[in-house]
Amino acid sequence: MSAPTQSSGQSAKGVGLLARLAENKVQGFTKRLSELHASQKKLDTRKAQVSSLKKDYQRQIQTIDADKGLAQVQALRRFILDLLEMEARVDLEQQSLSAQLDHAKQLLLDAQVGQKKMESLVERLDLDQARKRGLMEQRAIDAAAIARFNQRDDTPRAY
């Protein structure tokens, strides 16, 4: 009788370990997701800065006197072209990051589902073990009652 209890105890420990591993996995994906969100905020900030610089330099081009600043206008236009390239790179990084975020969200969701399954399994095993303990206790009580009944004195009594 002790062998099944021992193996179910070992399986409960194994499932408990799997539940902790699932929880660690969820925590890891949650951390990765928050890191990706921080990267996204940085990219948004960088894009806003590039856009602001581009607008500032476009305004400067309009205010330069055409006779005095032909070289200056050309330099500003080259700088604006550089800013446009930088803006395109930021857009590509944002697209890549967006794909990474989507993937990380899916991984997190899958890990959360796995964690819930493990938690449910642990609860089921705990309930099963409690039920088995209850049955064993009831059997012990029944065996004691039967033994006591069998030990009673069968001699007739005078009342």
Image (cartoon, rainbow, N blue to C red):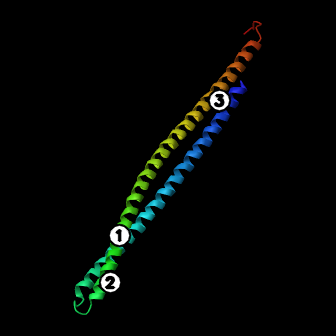
Q: Is residue 121 above or below residue 43?
A: above
Q: Amino acid at mark 3?
A: Arg
Choose mark 3 or mark 1, whichever is in front.
1
Residue 17 x/y as whole percent: 62, 42
Residue matched to label 2: 75
Residue matched to label 1: 87
Most extreme residue toward the top is: 156
Label 1: state its secondary structure: helix
Choose mark 3 or mark 2, whichever is in front.
2
Quadrant holding the C terminus = top right
For the image shown, how many numbered marks are present on the structure? 3
Most extreme residue toward the bottom is: 68
Nearer the observer, 73 or 15? 73
Q: Is residue 95 above or below residue 17?
A: below
Q: Residues within 10 Å of mark 1 (few under 14, many from 20)?
A: some
Residue 96 x/y as whole percent: 41, 58
Which of marks 2 and 3 precedes in the sequence?
2
Choose mark 2 or mark 1, whichever is in front.
2
Label 3: state its secondary structure: helix
Q: Residue at x 28, y 78 (%)?
A: 55
| Residue 121 found in image quarter | top right
Quadrant holding the N terminus = top right
Which of marks 1 and 3 precedes in the sequence?
1
Q: Residues within 10 Å of mark 3 (few under 14, many from 20)?
A: few
Give the distance between the C-alpha atoms of the residues marked 3 and 1, in whole angstroms: 67 Å
Which of marks 1 and 2 precedes in the sequence?
2
Q: Residue at x 57, y 38 (%)?
A: 122
Q: Is residue 51 above or below residue 159?
A: below
Residue matched to label 3: 133
The reply to whether the C-beta atoms of the residues labelled 3 and 2 are less than 8 Å apart is no
